[in-house]
Image: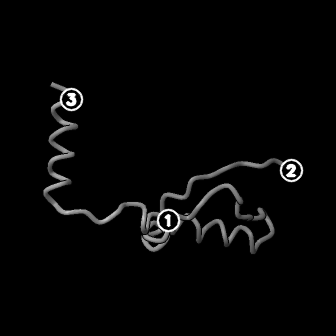
Amino acid sequence: MRTVTVDILNDKALDLLKDLELLKVIRLRKDSKTQDLSGNDLITKYKGSMQKQPISDVDEQLNSIRNEWE
């Protein structure tokens, strides 16, 4: 038996893999290190990571960062 890591690019591929599992050709298992980063998961992951601040402060920070490159 060999272990192979596969990146699923399309849900149809996952359906095919599930069919192969039903035929007992392969066994699927979720890797504990990987995360399914769907839209809701990303919202949960990053919610609260930025503090609310006035748009003028954000503009000043962006301009400061841009000016550092010049």
Front position in the image: 6 or 49: 49
Q: Residues within 10 Å of mark 2 (few under 14, many from 20)?
A: few
Q: Which residue is mark 2?
A: 1
Q: Which residue is mark 1?
A: 45
Image quadrant in which the C terminus is located = top left
Task: Please tell me whether mark 2 sits on a helix, a strand or a loop.
Answer: loop
Amino acid at the residue labelled 3:
Glu
**Residue 59 horizontal/vertical position (percent):** 15, 51
Q: Residue at x 34, y 63 (%)?
A: 51
Q: Is residue 59 above or below residue 13?
A: above
Q: Residue at x 43, y 68 (%)?
A: 47
The alpha-carbon separation of the residues under discs 3 and 1 comes to 30 Å
Q: Residue furthest top?
A: 70
**Residue 20 horizontal/vertical position (percent):** 71, 67
Task: Please tell me whether mark 1 sits on a helix, a strand or a loop.
Answer: helix
Comes first in the chain, label 2 or label 1? 2
- The answer to whether 47 appears left or right of 15 in the picture is left
Q: Residue at x 42, y 61 (%)?
A: 49
Front position in the image: 55 or 36: 55
Comes first in the chain, label 3 or label 1? 1
The alpha-carbon separation of the residues under discs 2 and 3 comes to 54 Å
Q: Which mark is residue 15?
A: none
**Residue 6 horizontal/vertical position (percent):** 62, 52
Q: Residue at x 18, y 38 (%)?
A: 64
Q: Nearer the viewer, mark 2 or mark 3?
A: 3
Q: Residues within 10 Å of mark 1 (few under 14, many from 20)?
A: few
Q: Nearer the viewer, mark 3 or mark 1?
A: 3
Q: Is residue 68 above or below residue 13?
A: above
Amino acid at the residue labelled 2:
Met
Q: Which mark is residue 68?
A: 3
Amino acid at the residue labelled 1:
Lys
